[in-house]
Image (spheres, rainbow, N blue to C red):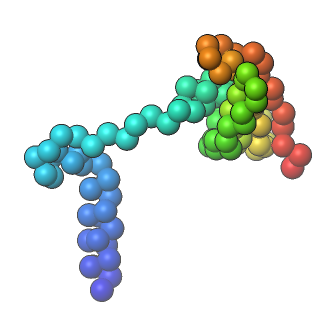
Amino acid sequence: MKKLMTSLMVLMLLTEFIPIRTMTGEAYAERPEPAYAKWGRLAMETAKEKYPKAKILDYLHIGREQRQTTEIEKFKLWVEDDGKEFGLYIDIEFNSKTDSVIRINTRKSAN
């Protein structure tokens, strides 16, 4: 039973990294980049500017808030700086039509 479970886990890991083309002869299956991806990169750049020695451990896209002429992409990053871990919220407000950044707000989490 243990050997079967190990084999299944290895197979699952391998299929995660083997392109579908190798398995089926069909074209590669690519996941489309999410709409918030470029804003996520900007959020990580902003965190690195604010905390240059920090290590970004993880990040979460919270969601998008729509306003009349602007939108706000909201993220939470988990950061380690000087041996301390904390959450860092980053909100990026941008013009909906031009994608130009209006403002970026950052704030540490309360705990």
Q: Quadrant of residue 46?
A: top right
Question: Which one is in front, 61 or 50?
Answer: 61
Seen in the image, is 36 located left or right of residue 89?
A: left
Q: Quadrant of the N terminus?
A: bottom left
Pick the residue in front: 56 or 69: 69
Residue 85 vertical position relative to residue 106 in the rendered view, above or below: below
Q: Is residue 53 rendered to the left or right of residue 28? A: right
Q: Is residue 94 visible?
A: yes
Q: Farthest residue to the left: give it.
A: 25
Where residue 103 sits in the image (x, y, percent)?
A: 78, 18
Q: Residue 32 in the image: x percent, y percent?
A: 40, 37
Q: Is residue 13 above or below residue 27?
A: below
Q: Residue 90's quadrant in the figure?
A: top right
Instruction: Choose between 13 and 25: the one closer to the eye.
Output: 25
Residue 20 x %, y %: 21, 48
Question: In the orientation shown, which residue stands out farthest toward the front?
Answer: 68
Q: Is residue 80 visible?
A: no
Residue for point 13% across, 51% down: 24
Tell me the residue at 64%/36% (across/down): 56
Q: Is residue 37 above or below residue 78?
A: above
* Picture coordinates of residue 11, whole percent (x, y): 26, 64
Residue at screen point 77% across, 42% down: 87
Viewer-side residue, 9 vs 21: 21
